[in-house]
Image (tube, rainbow, N blue to C red):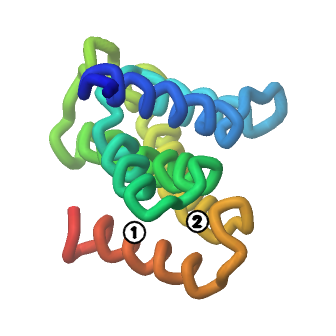
């Protein structure tokens, strides 16, 4: 049996591998935005939310290739919320996980756009056929994430 600590690390590793593909590095006009998205997405953290998603999906025999993308989407929503929470108009934090916050490392406008882009990307992931080819399941995933990250959730 795998320990909780090892299971948490495994979930983090799998989630980050998926996120690496979903938030690519770029040299194009979107490079600064993607860099800010990556800066915030790969800045550490326990990845507890992806662990919960993966473990729950395992209980229902959901293929890991599907649940890992859902786990990444949930982590992206969490990261978006942290970026926005750190902004001057909210908590005005300078540091997050021992590093300058996104608005300090980049600028306020880039932080807003990076958070927004992660939020939208999360929903885009949930509607992709690689998560499920069943439109009902896609819609339910979107509904649940919207409810959890909207005014009745976070």
Q: CA distance from mark 1 to mark 2?
A: 9 Å
Name the foreground residue: 113 vs 9. Answer: 9
Q: Is residue 41 above or below residue 51?
A: above
Q: Which residue is mark 2?
A: 126
Q: Can residue 116 be seen in the rendering of this structure?
A: no
Q: Which residue is mark 1?
A: 145
Mark 1–mark 2 contact, CB under 8 Å?
yes
Q: In the figure, is residue 124 to the left or right of 50?
A: right
Outermost top residue: 98
Which residue lies at the image location 45% right of the left edge and 39% below the top edge? 111
Looking at the picture, how far across and down is residue 57, in whole percent?
Answer: 43, 57
How many numbered circles does the render carry?
2
Which residue lies at the image location 53% right of the left edge and 60% below the top edge? 62
Quarter-of-image position of residue 44: top left
Quarter-of-image position of residue 6: top left
Q: In the figure, is residue 122 to the left or right of 91?
A: right
Residue 76 circle label: none
Name the foreground residue: 41 vs 1. Answer: 1
Q: In the figure, is residue 134 to the left or right of 104?
A: right
Looking at the picture, how far across and down is residue 39, in whole percent?
Answer: 50, 25
* Disc 1 crowd, CA 10 A, few/some/many (<14, 14-19, 20+): some
Tell me the quarter of the image containing the C terminus: bottom left
* Disc 2 crowd, CA 10 A, few/some/many (<14, 14-19, 20+): many
Outermost bottom residue: 136
- Precedes in sequence: disc 1 or disc 2: 2
Which residue lies at the image location 64% right of the left edge and 35% below the top edge? 34
Q: Is residue 7 above or below residue 110?
A: above
Q: Can residue 5 be seen in the rendering of this structure?
A: yes
Quarter-of-image position of residue 127: bottom right
Looking at the picture, how far across and down is residue 66, in whole percent?
Answer: 61, 56
């Amino acid at each position: 049996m795998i320990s909780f600590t090892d299971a948490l690390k495994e979930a983090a590793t799998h989630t980050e591998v998926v996120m690496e593909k979903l938030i690519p590095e770029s040299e194009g006009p979107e490079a600064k935005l993607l860099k800010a998205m990556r800066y915030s997405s790969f800045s550490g953290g326990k990845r507890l939310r992806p662990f919960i998603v993966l473990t729950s999906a395992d209980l229902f025999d959901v293929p890991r290739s599907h649940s890992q993308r859902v786990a990444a989407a949930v982590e992206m929503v969490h990261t978006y919320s942290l970026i926005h929470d750190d902004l001057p108009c909210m908590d005005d934090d300078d540091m997050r996980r021992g590093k300058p916050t996104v608005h300090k490392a980049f600028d306020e406008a880039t932080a807003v756009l990076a958070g927004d882009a992660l939020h939208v990307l999360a929903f885009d992931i949930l509607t992709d056929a690689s998560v499920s080819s069943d439109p009902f399941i896609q819609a339910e995933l979107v509904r649940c994430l919207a409810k959890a990250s909207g005014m009745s959730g976070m």
